[in-house]
């Protein structure tokens, strides 16, 4: 059974990965966080679910925003490359 500190540490790791737009690390951290939640006793799991839902909602929203920005930057770069090419 995981300790609360393990869950907190993994939550921080997920926040860091999202903040750094590290998609692979965020995905791995989310999987580890979910596994830790699943290992909790039912009462502790129930108490942890609202915070976990908020964390995953925040992470998902921020990662979608980051992907949209990256896609927009790529489109702009492609347009500029075509313009400069001729």
Image (cartoon, rainbow, N blue to C red):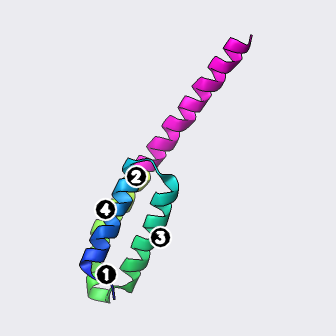
Rate crowding at label 4 as few (under 14), some (14 to 19) or many (20 or more) other CA atoms within 10 Å.
Answer: some
The residue that disc 4 covers is 12
Q: Answer with mark 4 or mark 2, whichever residue precedes in sequence.
A: 4
Q: Is residue 71 magenta?
A: yes
Instruction: Identify the residue shown where x is 40% and y is 52%.
Output: 18
Question: For residue 38, which quarter of the picture?
Answer: bottom left
68 vs 77: above or below: below
The residue that disc 3 covers is 31
Of helix, strand and loop, which one carries label 2? helix
The residue that disc 2 covers is 18
> Gap between marks 4 and 1, in whole Å?
18 Å
What secondary structure prevails in the magenta region? helix
Which-is-in-front pick, marks 4 and 1?
Answer: 4
85 vs 36: above or below: above
Give percent across and percent down for residue 71. Answer: 57, 36
> Which residue is more in the foreground, 71 or 85?
85
Q: Answer with mark 3 or mark 4, whichever residue precedes in sequence.
A: 4
The residue that disc 1 covers is 45
> Gap between marks 3 and 4, in whole Å?
14 Å
Give percent across and percent down for residue 46. Answer: 29, 80
């Amino acid at each position: 059974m995981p300790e609360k500190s393990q869950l907190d540490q993994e939550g921080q790791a997920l926040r860091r990965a999202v903040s750094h737009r590290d998609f692979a690390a965020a995905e791995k951290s989310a999987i580890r966080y979910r596994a830790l939640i699943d290992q909790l006793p039912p009462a502790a799991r129930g108490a942890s679910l609202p915070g976990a839902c908020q964390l995953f909602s925040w992470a998902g929203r921020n990662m979608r925003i980051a992907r949209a920005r990256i896609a927009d930057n790529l489109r702009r770069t492609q347009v500029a490359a075509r313009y400069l090419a001729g």
